[in-house]
Amino acid sequence: MTKIKNFFKSNTRIAVLILFILEFCISIWITPDKYDSEFFINQVKEMSVLNFVKMRYQTWTSRILIETLIGVILLKSRFVWVILNTLMMTILGYSILKLFVKNDDKSLVWMTICFILLYPLNKIASCDWGAGSMNYTWPLAMLLFSAISIKKICNEEKIAKYQYPLYSLALIFACNQEQSCAIALGAYFVFTFLYILKHKKVHPFLIIQCIFILLSLAFIATCPGNYARKSDEISTYYVDFASFSMLDKISLGLTATVNQLLLNTNVVFLVFSLVTTVYIFKQYKNNLYRAISLVPFVACLAFGVLKDVVCKMYPYFGIFCEILMKEDTMLTAGNYLNFINFLPLVLAFVILGSMLLNILLIFKNLKSNVAIVIFLLGVMSRMALGFSPTVFASTDRTFLFFEFALIIISVLIWQEFMKETDKSQIKTRSRLATFIAVLAVLQYVHTIIYTFISQV
């Protein structure tokens, strides 16, 4: 009884337990046997999992760890997937709390859970729940879990012997997914470099983790299936992609990221923009700073929530929205003379630039500014899609890493909010917390409804 009482004294542990229950209540209704999952199940029925993975390595993908897991789990039992998916989502929440929440404050812990619940899991199910979760949310969960080792090492905390292989295995699995591997490369190398600068020595485990990442990158780069798939996808999804230059692909990555972020009424982006705007308005009287803080929030409303209203009032704004929705690089050697083709790229720089400046205004310096690193890694995870012909065909699920970067930054901003003791600040924070909590509940209910619909 004493152990149970001590367990429930921790707000973090209670929150993680509740998150487990909430995620279980979503997963329990799902039978992952449609679309991509159905393909995997049928394939491993016809041939062994080993032969299937070999075939996929030669003809389609380097994600052999992920696809082995998909084949084994989905063929075995849906209940295995239900439990593992619930655990992965719980590990994701636990890792965010462990990495970015500095204390066990009740309101802070529960606000973090609300921020996590804002993410619309139905995006992951666009290619089916089973394959979607194992290709996206599971690698993200493992990536964040492995990053706990970075925090412990940088803070000189003790790591138990059994934890070292767990962190390494988690990283290896995470790096089998290309976006996750790119983020791991940036995160581990940045913090390894900072550790060396601070402590004037090398930490062996960080070096080992960096080696695993480099080996994973080499494996991805040399996989024959990746080249075969790219050629197939160019002819299927994006014929013009083969002629794009490096600058075209960078432009494509930037514009596709911001355009889809704005036009799809992204709730995570909306909340992030609102939180940054409210905080800066409360902290600064400077009109320029306030104007910069408003840019992402106003753009989110104008191009998303209020788009139909704005387009009725200003018809040519609707034409501009149609240009933004166009699946193209927007700016090429053949159309650069028309200034309107510059606007999507200009808008991308303005939105991302204002987000970056807002983060600098909130955290006030570059030194030890973890939020900046997270933001840049999130942006890079999406910009990398500009080098893939499926930049549009992959739909919203490829936003997972960027959206969770915004969720984590929102948590960090909220911690800054919590430091304020002024009554007006507390009142504003309370109202904002209520609004975010309501959105989180609505998003959770929406996911439950989608769960039932997707099983029909």
Image (cartoon, helix red, strand yellow):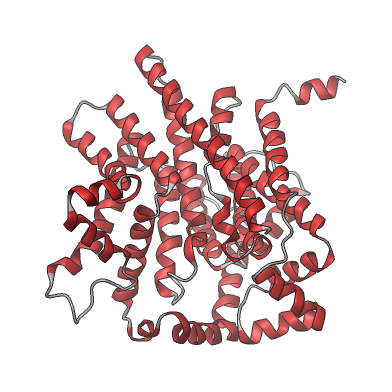
The residue located at (79%, 80%) in the rendering is: 50
Q: Determine the image quadrant of residue 20.
A: top right
- Tell me if residue 47 can be seen: no
Q: Check the image and report above or below for 328 versus 134.
A: below
What residue appears at the point 34 percent right and 35 percent down from the top-left corner? Answer: 362
Instruction: Give whichever of 371, 318 is nearer the camera.
Output: 318
Q: Is any part of residue 287 visible from this angle? A: yes
Question: Which is more toward the observer, 10 or 163?
Answer: 10
Q: Residue at x 50, y 62 (%)?
A: 398
Left or right of residue 287: residue 240: right
Horizontally, residue 209 falls left or right of residue 430, namely: right
Is residue 448 or residue 113 the one in the foreground? Answer: 448
Residue 325, percent from left and from top: 32, 64
**In front here: 237 or 223?**
237
Quarter of the picture containing the N terminus is top right
Give me the residue at 47% from left, 49% from top.
405
- Horizontal side of residue 390 vs 260, given as left or right: right
- Residue 324 on image: x %, y %: 28, 63
- Residue 352 in the image: state x and y as whole percent: 31, 52
Q: Say if 191 sits above or below 46 in the image.
A: above
How many labels, in total? Answer: 0
